[in-house]
Amino acid sequence: MSNSSSKQKLNVTIYGQQYLITGDESTEHIRHVASIVDEKMKEINHKNPFLDTNKLAVLTAVNIVSDYVKLRERVEQLETLLKEAKSEKENND
């Protein structure tokens, strides 16, 4: 883990609110992540404009984590296929 002197601090706007984000990632990464959250909140709000901000934030988190879980499952499937292909290649050599 990085020491605290390498932490990045960046002000971002998410759904009209300013946040100071501190993290080990680059400022570009932090901006990108904030942009994704902002876009997802706006997308969900467009579909259901009557949600209060707290419910909107929770639904946004659920949607983003769902996407993350699907991607992790796909990565695991691809890693399994890669291992099987390597094993098959080694057996044929």
Image (cartoon, rainbow, N blue to C red):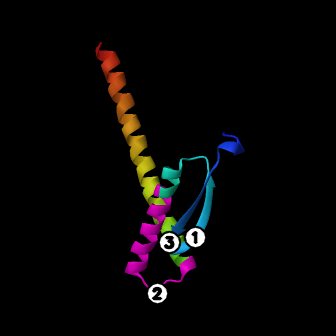
Binning the other alpha carbons within 10 Å of mark 2 as few (below 14), some (14 to 19) or many (20 upward) gives few
Whole-angstrom CA distance, mark 3 to mark 2, is 13 Å
The N terminus appears in which quarter of the rendering?
top right
Residue 27 sits inside the magenta stretch: no
Tell me where the magenta segment starts and ends, as one range.
Answer: 32-54
Type of amino acid at the residue the image marks with label 1: Gln
* Closer to us: 46 or 62: 46
59 over 83 or under it: above or below: below
Residue drawn at (45%, 62%) of the image: 35
As drawn, the residue found furthest toward the left would be 92
* Closer to us: 59 or 34: 34
* Closer to us: 83 or 60: 60
As drawn, the residue found furthest toward the right would be 4
**Label annotation for residue 59:** 3
**Label annotation for residue 18:** 1
Q: Secondary structure at mark 3?
A: helix
* Closer to us: 32 or 69: 32
Q: Earlier in the sequence, mark 3 or mark 2?
A: 2
**Label annotation for residue 66:** none
